[in-house]
Amino acid sequence: MEQEATFNASKPRVVVKHPALAMASMLIGAFVGMFSETSLNIALPKLMVSLGVTTATVQWLVTGYMLIIGVILPLNSLITKWFTTRQVVIFGLLDFLVGAIIAALAPSFPILLVGRMIQGIATGLILPLMFAVAMQVFAPAKLGTAMGVCALVIMFAPAIGPTLTGLILAKLSWHWIFWAFVPFLVIALFFALTSLENVGELTRPKVDVLSILSSVIGFASVVTAVSFASSRGWGSPLVLGLLVFGIVVLVFYAYRQLHIAEPILNLKIFAKPAFRAGALMVMLDFGIILSAMYILPMYMQKGLLLPVAMTGIIMLPGGIVNALVSAVSGRLFDNFGAKWLTRIGFIIAVIGGVMLLTTGTHTAVAFVIAAHIILMIGCPLAMSPAQTHALSALTGPTSGDGSTIMNTLQQIIGAIATALATSLLSMGQAASHLNAKRFHGRRSRCRLPALSWQ
């Protein structure tokens, strides 16, 4: 039995000629998707001035992008049962190319937002497929390393995104951020056309329209409600109404998935404790990472009054550490498992978060960099092992469902976390302006009458 287990652990579930080349197009596509998700964070203050929009409006370039990803992701499992791996990936890459060109040529905010949302469709298709295919084409004994490489690619984009964006904005207009995506997407298309093999079986199940509608409406309502809270406040009837409505629709959606014969998302896998615990940790971790990536550039440019190029350089060390730890944590999982890695990772992340809580308008840049690095050591150290641990608990077709659910929740939590960060940022700015107005009001009342020399 022992020899059989070793033998099985050394063989992948699906044999392909060149697993690395088969993964190349999806790895590049996921890299561009995450680059697109995080690269604009550093450009938001400049876009607000260039396009004449407010903080609450401009954050839709981030939230709207993740909202579309969150809407598409739950449908991924159904899509991959109707269309081949090659069809989905090639369509996704072409879709991203079109969205990038629209955004690059956008003369106004609405058209830019449309381009961003078109890109979100592609990321929603490719991101979960990358993890699902990796689970199939790599042997279980190498799965931790393979998932670590996937995490490295995803985290490398946020590592270099702010720096590249800062350098682009220092010399060129924001349009060139989107032109930068084009060569990567062309290379990904080349690999998809030449090396990608079909993985998985086409079963073409019945399409439950009611599940699709409730998924789209429910997720969109919750994210929209949290996004509106940044400008209208949490007590707004619109915010509360959308939030309650979205939650009710999602409860109906979950109930339906658990009781129909062919669900779009197999929520029954949450009955597995390993998957449930791993998914929860990944959600928390991803929310922390995206919130930090959104708030820190804003803080550096508006709080510390640093130029955009300098902001990108300051974000680079933490981003590089994030990418490196993501890769190393996968290999560590193969040797030590997930239990202690996730515990140590979250403890380190808490230390970095507390350090950032103590920052102000006069905080030394070195302290901010150190806090960011510590946060970016802890988060990926916990995230990759937690994700691999969760997905390893699933077998057969459920592994694809697990990947879809994991990525869906990541993007939904990411959208909500970013919207919450925007809301808290707006509340802080409003309180700061109010205090400044009160301070100047007290000074004007206490000012002595001017003496006349005439």
Image (cartoon, rainbow, N blue to C red):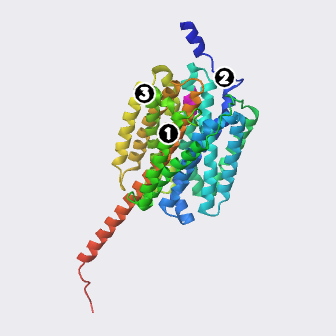
Task: Tell me where residue 397 appears, x and y as whole percent.
Answer: 60, 27
Quarter that holds the N terminus = top right
What element does badge 1 sit on? helix
Marks 3/2 in contact by CB < 8 Å: the verdict is no
Instruction: Please state which amino acid type lies under the numbered disc 1.
Output: Ala
Whole-percent x, y for residue 335 in the image: 48, 20
Q: Is residue 214 in view?
A: yes
Q: Residue at x 49, y 44 (%)?
A: 250
Q: Up-down: is 432 above or below 370?
A: below
Residue 14 is tagged as 2
* Residue annotated with mark 3: 341
Q: Does residue 25 appear left or right of residue 222 in this picture?
A: right
Report the magenta residues as a range.
Answer: 146-150
Q: Nearer the viewer, residue 17 or 352?
A: 17
**Mark 3 residue type:** Leu
Q: Is residue 110 shown above or below 33?
A: below
Q: Main secondary structure of the magenta part?
A: helix
Residue 362 place in picture, x, y as percent = 36, 55
- Name the one closer to the observer, 410 or 160: 410
